[in-house]
């Protein structure tokens, strides 16, 4: 098994068996369908939200396309899906992540079409769900430092969870001869952890900076998305 290609950019084309490829695709489809339904309703009611969605998609594309070498010989990258999860919720983040992963597979040869379902589940579903849950738990629609801390934690842990799930996906597909799935999971997780922890922290900081900018110019939209209370007017 060549770990460089496994962990270079998402899970590479053809690395998973048809069984795992189809399974992860089947698991991901309902989340994406749910996200499309939610997005269509919100954009129809307020077309101005489309710009925020585009910004979220562009942010995800740029960050997840960065290829950062690891001391292990593999590579890691940020995910960027935490912003979409914070602004629009995990359903919309699933759609944003899927579109980004599809374009990266077709245009940049990052990831692949056969592994699109697995990559979507880890980066666009599992990570955003954790990010959204943490943000809602911590922020409570507060616009002070508490909200910025919530954004930072959401983006950082959303990134980390993506790689925990990716490690699990690889471990399930390739259990170790000695130790099985648990040993394989530990091996993949150790490879990612060396670079992913600092990357997650950096992603959290970048997401806070961009969120602060969005807050300064889009308070009405954030209120409509229930990110903040409509009655709050104080600055972050």
Image (cartoon, rainbow, N blue to C red):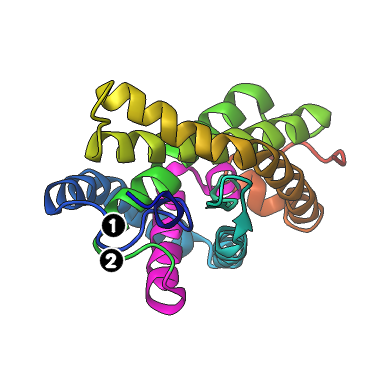
Q: Which mark is residue 174?
A: none
Front residue of 110 and 28: 110
Location of residue 202 in the rendering, given as x and y in whole percent from the top left corner: 73, 45
Residue named by callout 2: 113
* Image: 134 above or below 53: above
Give the magenta-colored segment's residue range: 83-109
Question: Which of the 4 quarters of the picture holds residue 152?
Answer: top right
Q: Which residue lies furthest to the bottom in this view?
A: 107
Image side of residue 4 versus residue 142, left or right: left
Question: Residue 46: x percent and y percent?
Answer: 53, 62
**If the image is split into quadrants, where does the C terminus sit?**
top right
Residues at circles 1 and 2 in contact by the CB criterion of under 8 Å: yes
Q: Residue at x 27, y 26 (%)?
A: 181
User: Circle 1 is placed at which residue position?
Assistant: 115
Query: Where residue 65 sits: x, y (%)?
Result: 56, 64
Q: Where is residue 80 in the image (x, y as percent from the top left)?
A: 59, 52
Quick one: SS at disc 1? loop
């Amino acid at each position: 098994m060549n770990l460089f290609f496994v962990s270079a950019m998402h899970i590479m084309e053809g690395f998973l068996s048809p069984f795992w490829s189809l399974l992860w695709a089947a698991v991901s489809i309902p989340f994406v369908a749910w996200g499309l339904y939610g997005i269509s309703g919100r954009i129809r009611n307020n077309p101005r939200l489309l710009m925020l969605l585009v910004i979220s998609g562009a942010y995800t594309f740029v960050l997840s396309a960065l290829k950062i070498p690891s001391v292990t010989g593999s590579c890691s990258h940020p995910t960027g899906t935490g912003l979409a999860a914070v602004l629009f919720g995990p359903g919309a983040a699933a759609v944003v992540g899927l579109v980004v992963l599809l374009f990266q597979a077709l245009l940049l040869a990052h990831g692949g079409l056969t592994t699109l379902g697995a990559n979507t589940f880890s980066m666009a579903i599992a990570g955003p769900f954790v990010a959204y849950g943490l943000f809602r738990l911590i922020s409570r629609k507060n616009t002070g430092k508490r909200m910025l801390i919530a954004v930072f934690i959401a983006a950082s842990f959303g990134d980390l969870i993506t790689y925990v799930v990716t490690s699990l996906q690889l471990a399930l597909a390739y259990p170790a001869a000695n130790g099985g799935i648990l040993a394989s999971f530990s091996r993949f997780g150790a490879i990612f952890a060396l670079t992913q922890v600092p990357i997650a922290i950096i992603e959290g900081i970048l997401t806070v900076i961009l969120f602060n900018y969005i807050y300064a110019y889009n308070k009405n939209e954030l209120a409509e998305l229930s990110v903040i209370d409509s009655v709050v007017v104080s600055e972050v």
